[in-house]
Amino acid sequence: MSNSTDTSLSLNTAARELGLYIGEPPFTLGWDVSGVVEAVGIGVTRFRVGDEVFGMPRFPHRAGAHAEYLTAPARDLAFKPASLSHVEAAALPLTGLTAWQALVPRAGVRKGQKVLIHAAAGGIGHLAVQIAKSLGAYVIGTASAGNREFVLGLGADEAVDYRGEDFTAVVRDADVVFSTLGGDVAARSVSVLRDGGTLLKMHYSTRDAVFPDAVARGIDTRFQLVEPDAAGLGALADLVERGLLRVHVAREFDLEEFAAAHALMEAGGFAGKLVFRLVE
């Protein structure tokens, strides 16, 4: 498959620095892809040459998406939403599936529930807000004051300034908390959940964290890692085509700007996703 774009730099940064999931260098980074099928293997019937597809192949193992061409299992891909460019579509798989798999099959979010989403302006967070709203939830997002209007524009019912406000003093009896942040955010989030609620801790540093108070109150705090999911990609594409999900691309980079893209990712402070544009 020819690969036109790639994104999800936060995990790529962790992989670059720590060898997270993919071992020791040398290696080619990248998981998210959107591109055109150039050839299919024996027995592949889902796609034909020329089809436009997107996905997150082989995660968490090496996919090598930071390249002009890559191979991928057909079951790790889905048809690209027609209304999205390849740049936009490449910003969707890893972050979108992370939010979808956590909020839908894991937490079972439904109409009327209260959902708190941390880092709601971020790559995963801005998609999680929209997915939760599409399910009928009342959504509260934490973000900087500068991103307040962006988060509300995504459909959030409330936006909490994480720098000026303590979310534990603002939010009460949440059914679900979605956290992609490290530090003590996940631990502090237990206090805003109702008994029997769900804490979706998605940051790798929290994978082994155990919160005694959560256990005593029947709160599910298991760590979850996203996995390739063609059905989930199809569900995301459906939300896009129905106008319920949009991808915000903060900036595009040529592959030669690899170092600059990673530096911006580490600095943070932007809304949405960063994308590599590999082929015109």
Image (spheres, grey):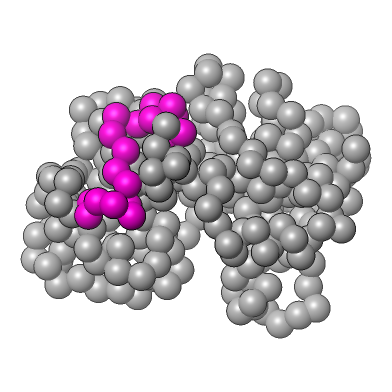
Query: Quick check: 160 above or below 10?
Result: above
* Side (left or right) of 251 relative to 113: right
Question: Total number of numbered labels?
Answer: 0
Instruction: Residue at 68%, 35% (x, y): give it.
Output: 88
Please tell me whether residue 11 is drawn above or below residue 5 in the rendered image.
below
Question: Could you tell whether 70 is left or right of 17 in the image?
Answer: right
Left or right: 232 in relation to 112:
right
Q: Residue, x 81% and y 45% (percent of image)?
A: 277
From what the image shows, is residue 154 above or below residue 183?
above
Quadrant of the image containing the N terminus: top right
Q: Is residue 269 above or below residue 222?
A: above
Q: Position of residue 225 (x, y in %)?
A: 47, 60
Q: Would residue 165 be counted in the magenta stretch?
A: yes
- Residue at (22% x, 54% y) in the render: 166
Q: Is residue 54 visible?
A: no
Across and down, in percent, residue 200 comes to: 33, 54
What residue do we see at 30% from left, 69% from top?
Answer: 184
Q: Nearer the viewer, residue 85 or 267?
A: 267
Q: Horizontal and vertical percent for residue 280?
A: 90, 37
User: Closest to the observer: 231 or 274?
Assistant: 274
Residue 134 within the magenta-colored segment of the rendering:
no
- Residue 180: quadrant of the picture: bottom left
Region in magenta: 150-167
Q: Residue furthest bottom?
A: 24
Tell me which corner region of the image, top left, top right, bottom left or bottom right, holds residue 163: bottom left
Residue 263 in sight here: yes
In percent of width and height, residue 31 lies at 69, 55
